[in-house]
Amino acid sequence: MNAFLIIVGVTVFVIVAAILIRTSRWKTVLTAPGNHAEELQNKHAYLHGRGIRSRIREQDGQPASGIAAGGMHASGQHSALKLQVHKDDVQRAKEALEDYSHERHTSNSPIL
């Protein structure tokens, strides 16, 4: 019986450690309400196109894709989304997002 409890305890410890290590590799760089999912997805695609590892997650940490990205909770409120970047790519992502904002601003400005 003691050996069984030790095995179960070690297994739980390994699972918890793996989850903590896995989630600590990603840093949130932007958040947005679910009704602004399109803008977050555009920035995610921009980063991905530049080889920057990124992902979109709901505020509770679950992957957000398809309808869920702009979905509503039972309370009628849109879920919040996070744009996360791999911890090794945070600086590159910040620079790329500045470029994204600059490109978007200049592409929408009339030529004088």
Image (cartoon, rainbow, N blue to C red):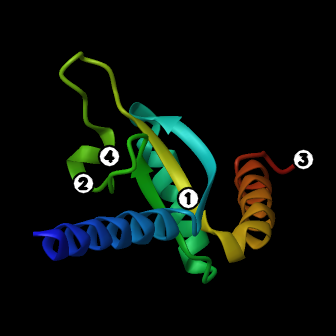
Question: Label 1 near label 3: C-beta < 8 Å?
Answer: no
Tell me the SS state at disc 4. Answer: helix
Q: Residue furthest top?
A: 75
Position of residue 81 measured from the top left corner of the image (x, y, whole percent): 45, 42
Position of 70 with respect to 92 (left or right) is left
Q: Disc 1 to disc 2, how far (Cα)?
A: 17 Å
Question: Which image quadrant: the N terminus?
Answer: bottom left
Hey, what amino acid is under mark 4? Ala
Q: Disc 1 to disc 4, how far (Cα)?
A: 14 Å
The residue where tag 2 is placed is: 66
Position of 18 with respect to 112 (left or right) is left
Q: Nearer the viewer, mark 4 or mark 3?
A: 4
Position of residue 64 measured from the top left corner of the image (x, y, whole percent): 32, 53
Indicate which disc residue 69 carries: 4
Please indicate, yes or no, whether residue 9 appears anywhere in the rendered image: yes
Indicate which disc residue 84 carries: 1
Question: Label 3 near label 2: C-beta < 8 Å?
Answer: no
